[in-house]
Amino acid sequence: MPILLFLIDTSASMNQRTDLGTSYLDIAKGAVELFLKLRSRDPASRGDRYMLVTYDEPPYCIKAGWKENHATFMSELKNLQASGLTTLGQALRSSFDLLNLNRLISGIDNYGQGRNPFFLEPSILITITDGNKLTSTAGVQEELHLPLNSPLPGSELTKEPFRWDQRLFALVLRLPGLASTEPEHLGSVPTDESAITQMCEVTGGRSYCVRTQRMLNQCLESLVQKIQSGVVINFEKTGPDPLPVGEDGLTDSSRPSNSFAAQPWHSCHKLIYVRPNSKTGVPVGHWPIPESFWPDQNLPSLPPRTSHPVVRFSCVDCEPMVIDKLPFDKYELEPSPLTQYILERKSPHTCWQVFVTSSGKYNELGYPFGYLKASTTLTCVNLFVMPYNYPVLLPLLDDLFKVHKLKPNLKWRQAFDSYLKTLPPYYLLPLKKALRMMGAPNLISDNLDCGLSYSVISYLKKLSQQTKLESERILASVGKKPPQEIGIKVKNHSGGGVSFTHSKNFRKLLKEIIGESAPRLTELNTKEFAGFQVGLLNKDLKPQTYRNAYDIPRRGLLDQLTRMRSNLLKTHKFIVGQDEDSLHSVPVAQMGNYQEYLKTLASPLREIDPDQPKRLHTFGNPFKQDKKGMMIDEADEFVAGPQNKVKRPGEPNSPLSSKRRRSMSLLLAKPQTPPTVTNHVGGKGPPSASWFPSYPNLIKPTLVHTDVTIIPDVHEEKRENGQIPPDGFLSKSAPPELMNMAGDGIPHHHQLDSLSDDFTSLRKDGLIHKPEYERIFILLEEVQGSLAVKKQFVEFTIKEAARFKRRVLIQYLEKVLEKIDSHHHLNNVNHINRRASC
């Protein structure tokens, strides 16, 4: 699974414009998108992993890492802005640390146990920059320097920050600001002359000098072809050159060979392709490339290894022996001067043995672990990795199978034991597996020793645990924004040169300030504080148009310095460019980014009435309300719900909806009529006592006895059965104790008192009521005054219930209001009758 890491230059110089009017940063973004489009044509791109790193301070430079998906990668890419310095060295170090984050945890580097080419994470690091001077807080740098200190545990085990399966490619943008009249140069893209070129060549990559858009597209197509699974190895020739080859393909001893003159093929820094298995999709191998040291139990620590192993090769005329069933690894070499030289000899039987210096215990050069050999069709050169010191092992195995028939004698065992002594300890396990595959499993004992001391093994385990913690910390910081600057950092000069306290101008100025009794130099602190900062007087400074430096008053110098720094580093999004119109110009791609605009606004004040439903701040209807925030009573929501919803066939009954229907049917028989019970007045009304002004304690909360049989919802029955049940709320009336069948229809005082007591006893026995309505009716009972006053209270309560959409409560109150009106009318009739009788 290839890893593609894009390192985008986000320094302020990337805001420069090309002849097309687009900035360098826009071109970089378009280049990444085009690269992904070209890469998607390959079916193998489904397993690609994309990462995004910028020139920001670590760890905020990581925009998309190991856990971010492709959508996050594209979103962060579009939101990149150019500001700050060209800290290429720090950005490269952060990129390599991100790639190496999990290597110690997975054990892919296998420190001290040989290098396995089939254990790899092929990574392509593509950086897009303008190639300008490298800048940092310490000044301008002429050369590229990567920080030596890394927060990643175990980084000291490798001399370089990169690994042998990681390659760096650079697209250096050199597009002109004015259209060129010269014809475009066609052909291969040359390398750039910036400081990053050497770094690319060291890792096995290269740089591209991009001068036109067509060259950029050509480079992107070339980079897509560079995505190969493999590792980089340094091949260096040792020993004399082989004899020249004549036209007939045979060696010609009459032609002199220049063995001392340096040739391009003597030293090559190229990739070997590690092809994945066609069935599993994962590379499979058997033998490692040996370490450049002999592991020993007395070794206190591991020596740091180089990222790319140095493999020396020497020409051998004879072809190696072939043993049946002996596994070997075959890797194809990337085209190079070495492969060209071997192919030009046109001798597929000539081998070049390969060694690793200091890999053996008794030999400085080491023993051969494989050989280079041209293919039979002379189209490529392959590296065959064999068991260590295979020229000695192969004859022994041949005798074991052909002569001894897997029953070796004492002499053969002594020769085999002598061979094992020249073998590095980490070769014992793969050799034992190979012999088991060949049918000789008992030649090597099971008590294998890896060759590392206990202290080294403990140290590697400790590093693995520390790496897990560091990995979690770095991954948690991905996507976070860097903190705002609280001051301007001052460069520390105490590291080199003479301190400012020894300057004549400083001593003269100090003498003028404090008088003749100036302190001696020994009394002054000559070590300036490394983290000293000049505080910002006003953090909310707005940019200004460019002014004459002499027009700035002395008291405003610090504020103006802050503005100049903001303009230089482009840290403010409203930076004034050439004129005032730039304040109001917005790129087309950012015109619809309303969410980013909302983030810059101040937090709104709270609502005056927190119970009011919140409005959605969206485009379109500004009065659209959020239905989730509306206050709706359960009963009201049931009433206002969809009345004509047809049940879908096969749709399961929701337990929540059925439970709500059962609870709501306690209150409603019809959605638009209040629940009714027979009351003590003889008519039908709300399930509370009638409220007459002359009789207190008549308004009670909603009461329903738990023993009554409930008629299901009318509309639900109609939808399911197609029939409408008879009107009514209760299948049987309330208890007789609650009903007064007096002919006058007016309750007596003792009946009202007993009714109030019955209400209390029934509530204790388990009557169902609505607590929010009970409080309202209790308050209405306490109202004192005339009928008009009480009527006003009821009307006001109805208005408030309508504002909160309490429909059921409104129906109860309307019934109460009707009874007040009817009682008022009855009082008027009685008054007229009394006057008439008089």
Image (spheres, rainbow, N blue to C red):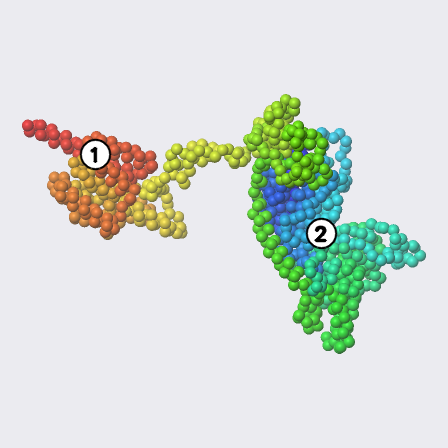
**Residue drawn at 24 percent across, 37 percent down:** 780
**Residue drawn at 42 percent across, 34 percent down:** 606
Q: Is residue 481 left or right of residue 205?
A: left
Amino acid type at image mark 1: Gln
Quarter of image, res 683: top left
Residue 559, image x, y percentages? 60, 29
Q: For the residues carrying marks 1 and 2, which lies nearer the camera in this image?
A: 2
Residue 649, image x, y percentages? 39, 50
Residue underneath mark 1: 784
Which mark is first along the chain, 2 or 1? 2
Res. 333 in view: no
Which numbered tag is attached to residue 574? none
Quarter of image, res 387: bottom right
Query: Circle 1: is it few (<14), some (14-19), or many (20+) Cα within 10 Å?
Result: few
**Residue drawn at 73 percent across, 57 percent down:** 331
Residue 496, image x, y percentages? 72, 40
Amino acid type at image mark 2: Lys
Q: CA distance from mark 1 to mark 2?
A: 93 Å
Is 422 above or below relative to 775? below
Quarter of image, res 741: top left
Which type of secondary structure does the marked residue at label 2 adopt?
A: loop
Between 746 and 520, the one lying in front of the other is 520
Between 54 and 435, the one lying in front of the other is 54
**Residue drawn at 23 percent across, 32 percent down:** 791
In the picture as drawn, the residue positioned furthest to the right comes out as 254
Res. 456 in view: yes
Residue underneath mark 2: 159
Residue 232, image x, y percentages? 73, 52
